[in-house]
Image (cartoon, rainbow, N blue to C red):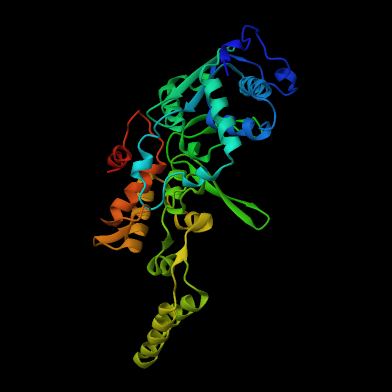
Amino acid sequence: MDFSKIDSSQTSVEGYETRPDSPDEVKGRILHHDSDFLAYQCGYKWETESLEVSIEHLRKAIQTCRIMAGAEFIFLYLTMGDKGGRNATATVKEYQAQRAGRDPGLTKRVKELREYMATCTDPGVTPKVQMEQEADDALCQAMQVAKDQYQLNVLQSADKDLWMVGGLHVNAKTYEIEDFPFGYGQCDLDINGTRKKLVGRGTSFFWHQLLMGDTADNIPGLPEFSEKIVLEYWPTKAIIAARDKIKSSTSTGQSTKLKKSLHNLIAKIKPKKVGAVGAYEYLYHCKTDRQALVAVLAAYREHYGDADFLANHWNGQIFTSTAGEMLLEQARLLWMRRTEGEDVTTFFEELR
């Protein structure tokens, strides 16, 4: 389709300004928008419509996002090339492999909508096409640069990966503007019925993801907590009672008998899947990035051991790895880069 035929000379797209709860526009404010998600959202909703109709809905959605952020301008961040080397980094699981099975019609429409946004000239709209890194990385970098102009730069994304990025965020569902910390922050469990989901703000979320992974990008994190970690953090009531009895025992014979009983109980401990609850409970007492690094590294070492080991690459090859290399792989996949080309080891060095 020739996108140049779309009339972008008008100062508004009819229909977008119908939200009664629109905030006042802040002069000079920029909405840094994760537009990869918007392409999927609009593509999914209007896949059966013509491309022209889908684009009109997309244009309205773009302007709605800008207005609801109180922004004068909107920058559209789009991933159109390499994903910053993440595909080559991943060994345990293929990076974003599950996306290959999406409906071909939807995939085609998303590609078309991305291409339109990359050339969009609507008033106040500036495409930010990323060819060497993911849009998420560029969004993080924009918010880092904008630290000194806090109120004039706002981020909007439905991707939880960006919860680790500080600054003002527009909630993708409610359009409320929320303040995220530059630094560790915190994570909490959002309990909805029987389902427990981890929510977080700041780099705390990065450390939790290193444990539980990210299913949206096919990042496994740590497969499980070892028996030693389980024993330390989740001892059964029987084990706790046995330990208490040993402490209060008065005779050597009784103590020996109780210790044997405790040993048998410990032998029954099994590894535990990480999950949101496990990650939250394990890192609950961490309040700084350094404390979280020590705790996460300990979990990886307890799982993989201190020695080199043979690992299976997702492509079928066998290679030699270590606990530290496994942690570094997951960190490189999950870390939002504060400067273009940044390696997560720069962040780790800052914590020494």
Identified at 69% across, 32% down, the residue is 48
* 25 left or right of 147 in image: right
Identified at 50% across, 19% down, the residue is 127
Residue 109, position in %: x, y?
Answer: 59, 30
Quarter of the image where the C terminus is located: top left
- Number of labels in the image equals 0
Residue 52: tell me if it is visible.
yes
Q: In terms of image quadrants, where is residue 72?
A: top right
Which is more toward the observer, 335 or 184? 335
Residue 10, position in %: x, y?
Answer: 65, 7
From this viewpoint, which residue is outermost toward the bottom? Answer: 253
Residue 118, position in %: x, y?
Answer: 51, 20
Which is more toward the observer, 250 or 120? 120
The image shows residue 196, relative to residue 119, as above or below, that is below
* 279 left or right of 292 in image: right
Residue 231, position in %: x, y?
Answer: 42, 70
